[in-house]
Amino acid sequence: MLEGIHYRLWRLADERHINTIQNVVAGTKAIIADGHHRYKTAYQYAQDHPEINGSDRVMVTMVNAYNDGMHVLPTHRIVFGKPIDDDRFIKKLKGLFDIEKKPSAAKLLNKMDQHRASNTISLGVLTRVGNAYLLRYKGEDNWSSDLSTESQALDVNVLHHLILKPGMWN
């Protein structure tokens, strides 16, 4: 756990898979799009701790940006540790979002797919008791951070800066 956030990592140890990846990306350009902060942190860690075996390595996710069949799926977060009162949580979000309760997770995901095509910032919430909510960001100026307009338009920043950081579930 780091800063109250649990991370899960899986190790790729099969030499055949590693060699395949190395052969595919050899001689190509890599663009660091998401994760550049993690890269900077890993780089600094390697500089500060060269004596630690493996400190000079960092995990990355590489995606073929030219593959029409490739879709980057939404960001997922699990909030746990404290029971969340669904009604209170949803009531707190009403100032920021238009909220629509859905009968199931499948219906929620279907509706989110429709919104993704329209460039609407939409978030899905599934609660422990099985309630499913579609949150459509109203886009009002609710930002206390110094994020650029472009950064404010990213669903992951809406999630983190307007819901998770302020602890809206408490």
Image (tube, grey):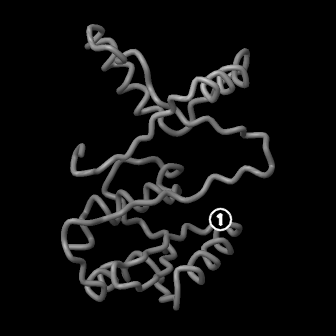
Residue 50 in percent (x, y) is at 30, 9
Residue, x 49% and y 74% (percent of image)?
Answer: 138
Residue, x 40% and y 25% (percent of image)?
Answer: 40
Residue 118 falls left or right of residue 5? right
Nearer-the-camera pick, 18 or 79:
18
Residue 1's place in the image compared with 130, above or below, is: above
Q: Looking at this rendering, what residue extends furthest in the top direction?
A: 51
Q: Quadrant of residue 112?
A: bottom right
Residue 71 in percent (x, y) is at 69, 53
Residue 125 in percent (x, y) is at 43, 75
> Label 1 is placed on what type of residue?
Asn
Residue 31's place in the image compared with 47, above or below, is: below
Residue 22 falls left or right of residue 56? right
Nearer-the-camera pick, 80 or 100:
80
Residue 43 in percent (x, y) is at 39, 19
Residue with the mark numbered 1: 119
Pointer 1 local density, CA inside 10 Å: few below 14, some 14–19, many at least 20: few
Q: Across the whole image, how many numbered discs are drawn on residues?
A: 1
Residue 45's place in the image compared with 76, above or below, is: above
Residue, x 37% and y 24% (percent of image)?
Answer: 42
Nearer-the-camera pick, 163 or 47:
47
Disc 1 element: loop
Residue 103's place in the image compared with 26, above or below, is: below
In which quadrant is the C terminus drawn?
A: bottom left
Residue 131 falls left or right of residue 17? left
Q: Quadrant of residue 29?
A: top right
